[in-house]
Amino acid sequence: MLLLNLDRASAVPLYLQIAQQLAARIDAGALAAGEALSPTRLLAQRLGVNRSTVCRAYAQLQASGHVESSAGGYTRVRARAAATDAARTSDGHFDWGSRLRSATSPAQSVQAVGDGIDFRPLAPDPRLAPMDALRRAMKLALADDAASLLDYPSPLGHLPLRQWIAERMARLGAPVTADSVMLCNGAQHGLDLVFRTLLAPGANVAVEAPGYACANALIAQHGANAIGVPMRNDGLDLAALGAVIAQHRPAALYTMPNFQNPTGITTPIAHREQLMRLCETHALPIIEDGFAEDMKYFGRAVPPLKALDRQGLVIHVGTFSKLLFPGLRVGWIAASPALIPALAATRGTADLGGSALPAAALWQLCASGEFDRHLRRLHTEYRRRMQRLIRATRTWLTGERVRCSVPQGGYVCWVEVDGGQAGTHADEAELIAALAAAGVRVTPGAGCYPAGHTPAGAAFRLSIAQADEAAIERGVQRIGEVLRARRP
């Protein structure tokens, strides 16, 4: 019998130490299939433990499939099917990499040095979050109907919040009712539900280039293809979109008309009207991402595409995550009443409707007026930040080689660099690394394009979501210094 070493001072129970050590020997082949283990009474005497301790250890081994026993017989090592090497990696573990549907890999982070300034986050600044108001809202929601909120919810989500969203969208001109709104766990979950419902494997989706990287990755994960349509200063290149429709016959168009991520562009009403007519002509569904639609700082508000929708083509996806608390994960889908049941059925196969409590708490915030008061505070703060960013780019990022977008709202600004050492796509990684070395972290532009679409030059995205005015000024100044140092 192999010796076992028990540590009586360990927090691990003795029976589990016995089971683990015997299991390790069985796995290593030191105990062969069919070999009998020592009788429980004899092993207990050798180890100086109670017989019940050994019995529990053998029961643990039997539960894990290492041994088997029969009434009145010995406990023997169980014969198990030998693992093949075909599905193993070099360290002997199962090769999950060979089974993944998508070849996408996690984004590589670059560590900055010194007092780093991070222009990457898109979540709102937690320093601005109305925490006390949320605590009160949670208490009120539970006091109103705790039993209902903690039960399985409706697949469409909390009705009072859906009614509030529908009324708010109706004031923007969108023909929306509570029955055509379904809550979801943030905009990303909403996009996933839409893609799962609409896209067959191999389908094509027209997307903005540059555009939202996570949407492109999500399309790929569903076995579909993201087909890039170039962005112009006023939005999608509609002539290019027409060519994509004719050549690729996409199943849908994904677009972000307000404060587009990553460029910050807001499309004017005339462009939206032309886009709607084009999609109506070709019966092309539009997935409108309104991720930061309420964050308008300058100029007049432009109605969402859903407000121009005469045929029920537009699926509007919204979220509270970019305005309040990202961790609550509450967003919504506003679509044709003919589509909502299919989306609800898709969701029902995955999470049975999500959690009602966060939605109920958010409704308390909205119904009390706290949401609108918070939104006004956000506008005041982020208007100052965006003004500082625009002034800083005009001061520090000057010259023919650099072009910066001028957003009317939202959180992001797009910077393109032409010519010189930083003028090619291959040089973008070097530029991003140089910025990181200077203590500035930005989002690389190359990741904002769909697979197969190679941008002409280097670019990156700046986000002011969590950078205050002082950090914005210092960060853009450092970017300018890096760009000037790289000039030929």
Image (tube, rainbow, N blue to C red):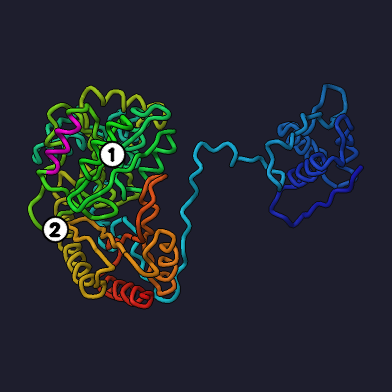
- Residue 262 figure quarter: bottom left
Residue at 25% in and 47% down: 291
- Residue 364 figure quarter: top left
341 relative to 432 in the view: left or right: left
The x and y percentages for residue 199 are 36, 29
The residue pinned by badge 2 equals 297
Residue type at mark 2: give it: Tyr
394 relative to 486 in the view: left or right: left
Front position among marks 2 and 1:
1
Q: Could you tell me which secondary element the residue under label 1 belongs to?
A: strand
Q: What crowding class fits label 2: few (fewer than 14 Cα within 10 Å), some (14-19), or many (20 or more)?
A: some
Quarter of the image that includes the N terminus = top right
The front one of 428 and 130 is: 428
Main SS type for the magenta part? helix
Residue at 34% in and 61% down: 460
Residue at 47% in and 67% down: 111
Q: Which mark is residue 254?
A: 1
Q: What crowding class fits label 1: few (fewer than 14 Cα within 10 Å), some (14-19), or many (20 or more)?
A: many
The x and y percentages for residue 344 are 31, 27
468 relative to 295 in the view: left or right: right
The x and y percentages for residue 339 are 26, 25
Q: Please report the bounds of the magenta region as a residue range.
A: 271-280
Query: Does 272 lie within the magenta span?
Result: yes
